[in-house]
Image (tube, rainbow, N blue to C red):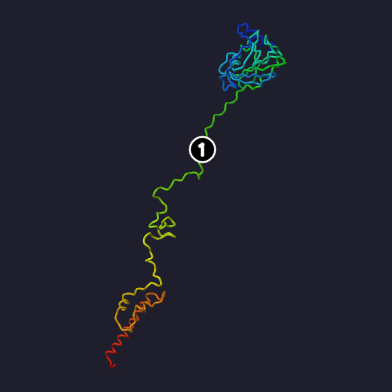
Amino acid sequence: MNRRTLRGSAAVALVAAGSVIGPGSPAAAVGSAGYCPDASGVTVVVDFNELGGGTVVRCAPGSQATGLAALKSAGFQITGTLRWGEGFICRIEGKPSADAEKCVDTPPASAYWSYWHAPNGGSWTYSDKGVLNRTPPAGSFEGWSFSLNRNPDDAPRPGVTPSRPAPPPPASPPAPPAPPPASDVPVAPPPAGGGGAPPPVDGMPPSADGGQPGATGGPATIGPSTSATAAPSASAAVLPSPETATAATRPGSADEPVLTDAVAAREDGGVPLGTLVGVLLLAALAAGGLVTARRRRVADPDD
């Protein structure tokens, strides 16, 4: 008994059991496009081959009682025959057209829909049971392929491998944001009362190094001017010592030298003060000796 005979026998048995639905009954547009994502449903593949339309894959969710239920639950429109009802599939999605196939009796062996099944990851097997006599396991594949002008033993398999694609890997968590460049990191302002140049005092500008005492380019100290401690200039008056001041005020004759004149006559930028004082002392001693001798001559005229 060939494949075509087996399929026809199954259809006859189903009709005798009273499971007859009239031709052209619409199917509910349920299911979803593509493979079932897991083993909870049945994936249905329809290959139109020479009829045009390519290969369509849809998912019938949940468990399916029969191959016909899986085909309808996946969302395909089907048409049975006037004689056998939907126990014999004549059209899927309106193909072949009514002009090519009247769907009154069993379609001819030269142009019919062949019925296949496969486990997930397995290979297609031609079904030896009718569409109402097979219960597809959950997670399996149901296939329909139109066979045109072929021998009954040479029906084409559906043109899709019966294997669900692997689920996508879980999404990795997003990477943390990169730290900002060093140039973009804000710099905290210096605390109040911290470092920095001190405010100017009495209108004086701050020193070059932030007000450190004795720094180059700034005053050594903040206060009165230090010009009083500077060395005397060449034109400054030299104060005589106490001894010379006494000698200068000592009364004498017109011939006696006046020490203050000698002091005032000192050249600018001249002899150091100590040397000048010594010379003045010697001159004073010599003048004193001269005055004493003159007094003796005056006191003793016979000498």
Residue 102, located in which quarter of the rendered image? top right
Circle 1 residues within 10 Å: few <14, some 14–19, many ≥20 = few
Q: Residue at x 30, y 88 (%)?
A: 294
The answer to which quarter of the image holds residue 132 is: top right
- Residue 18: image quadrant is top right
Q: Residue at x 68, y 20 (%)?
A: 52
Q: Residue furthest bottom?
A: 302
Is 276 on the left or on the right of 152, as rendered?
left
Q: Say which amino acid is labelled 1.
A: Pro
Towards the viewer: 227 or 37 = 227
- Position of the N terminus by quadrant: top right
SS category of the residue bearing label 1 = loop
Residue 96: percent from left, percent from top: 68, 15
Point out the residue furthest to the front here. 203
Q: Nearer the viewer, residue 157 or 237?
A: 237
Q: Could you tell me residue 174's position as x and y percent?
A: 52, 34
Residue 98 as seen in the image, left or right of residue 60: right
Q: Nearer the viewer, residue 39 or 25?
A: 25
**Percent x, y of residue 68:** 61, 13
Q: Residue furthest left?
A: 299
Count of numbered tags: 1
- Pick the residue in front: 213 or 179: 213
Q: Quadrant of the C terminus?
A: bottom left
Residue 202 percent coordinates (x, y): 38, 57
Residue plotted at (62% across, 15% down): 77
For label 1, the residue is 177
